[in-house]
Image (cartoon, coloured by chain):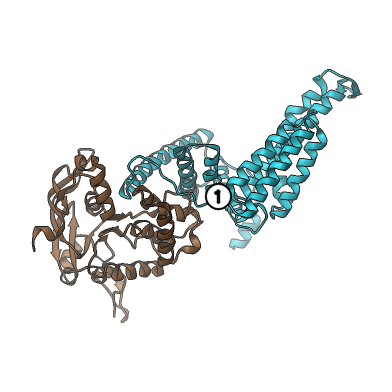
Chain colours: A cyan, B brown
């Protein structure tokens, strides 16, 4: 009987996901991505074995070289180097494509596309119907912009994927970021996940009691109420955390323990990064 | 027993939140050195507030609280030397371990207390390694707290306070929201730790662990102490336990197939 009834009901049209559903999915994805990044950071790859301070300095140097180079061959060479590093660090190509290359190409492409037509220079071709002229200088400028961004973004992602975030933060100390800034960033990172978990639980508990689709105004009202509750919870949490810190002797001054030790391999890696970045800057100056 | 042997001496302590919610109402108790004490009570009975007063995080609105013969007041905690000495001697494990695990990794968490005490860094590294080993959490040292299970978080929270080798350990609902295995690990720890020298004060409404973890017990209700004595004596008084919402009455089936209603505890309760 029930089966017959179920069969007689016309298949429901796929509806658009509500704000609440999209939020739950977004929160779950954020947590999954962080878990994936932490797993990758524990893998036995080349970059994972290097001291985080060397990685921060080295990747920044390579990123600067890619940004400052005025020679497309050099930028492409650095891009090839980034690919090699990714391969040696067990970072899958599809991760680079989905996390960096596709989004960077989309956004940079949107910026670079008009430059192909509006940059004055030698005409290369003319678009049919619209009649817009593509210039050689425009294409060259767009190519530089896209390759620079893709290369720089690849180096940044490699640093983040191959280093536990806590170590990236601590390594910022070599760039003279104040201890208090590092500690605040660390605590923010730590508690974002707790608040994400709380937010997801709140949304899921609401979802489990909802039937049908709410009107837009109701969705906004509920979302506003959730934000208020979350804010109140985070305020309570921050009070309790402060007490927990006080309980263990915190008196307003921040101290951290730097447990990094430079080994021979780290010095070699630092020399390698410096050499490659220096050579790229020298060769790419023209 | 002499006053000098007392770790805590609380007299007529009252604590109000926002001037109108009274969490503690005229509480007096004395806790001797080396005793294991259970503070029992239903939710909202004032147990956690008392622990925070004993840890110098809250200060009585009226009445007084002494620790090691010294008054616990906001003014006393302005003095760095007093504050550091007190924090070294008294440790609190919060009910919600997420509150207590605020560092990016387990290693940093355990190192936090010694760093505040300005211990030499080499000694901190050595002590942290020893403590991680003792609590069997060395494999978690680079893990972020958000990736730990409830039992692991509790062990890290314990390690983060025990590294200072405190004389007094305050535990707020240590077995709350833990699976049975993690609960038994915490109880085993509480039974074994201290060796009669350390003072352990545990708040709980888990009646099944009280006799194992405490020599003395207090029952709180509505911010007041309504009973005190040996745990076995208090736990035998069903009327008292029911009155203070520590046990309750409801209908349930016995093995003879009959339904009955009488006060009982769920865990370990024999219905036959």
In the picture, residue B151 is in which quadrant?
A: bottom left
In the picture, residue A15 is in which quadrant?
A: top right
Residue B176: x and y in percent read 34, 60
Q: Which residue is mark 1?
A: A31
Q: Residue furthest top?
A: A120
Does residue A63 appear to the left or right of A136 in the view shown?
Answer: left
The crowding category of the residue bearing disc 1, from other C-alpha atoms within 10 Å (few below 14, some 14 to 19, many at least 20), is some
Does residue B250 appear to the left or right of A268 in the view shown?
Answer: left
Does residue B36 appear to the left or right of B163 in the view shown?
Answer: left
Q: Secondary structure at mark 1?
A: helix
Q: Could you tell me which quadrant the N terminus of chain A lies in? A: bottom right
Q: Is residue B153 above or below residue A213?
A: below
Say whether residue A29 is visible.
no
Q: Residue at x 65, y 54 (%)?
A: A265
Q: Residue at x 86, y 23 (%)?
A: A135
Q: Nearer the viewer, residue B17 or B158?
A: B158
Residue B236: x and y in percent read 17, 72
């Amino acid at each position: 009987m029930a089966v017959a009834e179920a069969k007689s009901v016309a298949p429901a049209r796929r509806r658009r996901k509500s704000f609440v559903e999209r939020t739950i999915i977004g929160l779950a994805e954020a947590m999954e991505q962080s878990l994936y990044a932490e797993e990758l950071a524990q893998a036995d790859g080349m970059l994972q074995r290097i001291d985080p301070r060397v990685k921060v300095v080295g990747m920044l140097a390579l990123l600067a070289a890619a940004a400052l180079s005025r020679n497309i061959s050099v930028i492409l060479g650095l891009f090839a180097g980034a690919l090699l590093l990714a391969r040696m660090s067990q970072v899958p190509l599809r991760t680079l494509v989905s996390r960096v290359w596709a989004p960077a190409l989309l956004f940079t492409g949107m910026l670079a596309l008009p430059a192909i037509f509006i940059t004055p220079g030698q005409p290369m071709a003319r678009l049919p119907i619209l009649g817009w002229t593509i210039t050689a200088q425009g294409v060259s400028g767009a190519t530089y912009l896209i390759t620079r961004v893709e290369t720089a973004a690849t180096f940044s992602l490699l640093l983040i994927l191959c280093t536990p975030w806590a170590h990236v933060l601590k390594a910022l100390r070599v760039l003279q970021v104040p201890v208090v800034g590092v500690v605040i960033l660390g605590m923010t990172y730590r508690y974002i996940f707790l608040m994400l978990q709380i937010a997801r639980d709140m949304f899921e508990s609401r979802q489990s009691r909802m039937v049908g689709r709410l009107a837009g105004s109701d969705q906004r009202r509920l979302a506003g109420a959730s934000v208020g509750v979350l804010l109140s919870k985070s305020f309570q949490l921050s009070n309790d955390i402060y007490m927990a810190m006080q309980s263990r002797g915190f008196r307003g001054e921040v101290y951290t323990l730097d447990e990094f030790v430079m080994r021979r391999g780290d010095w070699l890696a630092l020399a390698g990064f410096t050499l490659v970045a220096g050579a790229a800057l020298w060769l790419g100056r023209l | 027993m002499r006053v000098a042997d007392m770790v805590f001496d609380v007299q007529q302590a009252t604590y109000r939140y926002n001037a109108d919610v009274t969490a503690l109402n005229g509480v007096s108790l004395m806790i001797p050195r080396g005793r294991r004490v259970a503070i029992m009570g239903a939710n909202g009975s004032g147990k956690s507030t008392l622990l925070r007063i004993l840890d110098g995080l809250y200060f009585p609105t009226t009445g007084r609280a002494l620790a090691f013969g010294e008054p616990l007041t906001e003014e006393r905690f302005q003095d760095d030397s007093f504050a550091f000495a007190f924090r070294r001697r008294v440790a609190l494990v919060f009910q919600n371990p997420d509150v207590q695990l605020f560092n990016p990794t387990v290693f940093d968490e355990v190192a936090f207390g010694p760093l505040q005490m300005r211990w030499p860094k080499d000694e901190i590294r050595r002590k942290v390694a020893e403590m991680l080993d003792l609590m069997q959490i060395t494999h978690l040292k680079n893990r972020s707290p958000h990736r730990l299970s409830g039992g692991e978080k509790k062990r890290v929270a314990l390690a983060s306070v025990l590294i200072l080798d405190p004389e007094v350990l305050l535990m707020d609902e240590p077995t709350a929201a833990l699976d049975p295995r993690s609960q038994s690990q915490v109880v085993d720890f509480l039974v074994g730790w201290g060796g009669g020298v350390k003072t352990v004060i545990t708040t709980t409404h888990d009646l099944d662990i009280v006799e194992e973890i405490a020599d003395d017990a207090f029952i709180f209700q509505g911010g007041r102490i309504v009973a005190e004595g040996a745990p076995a004596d208090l736990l035998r008084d069903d009327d008292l336990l029911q009155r203070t919402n520590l046990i309750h009455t409801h209908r349930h089936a016995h093995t003879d197939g009959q339904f009955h209603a009488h006060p009982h505890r769920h865990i370990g309760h024999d219905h036959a």
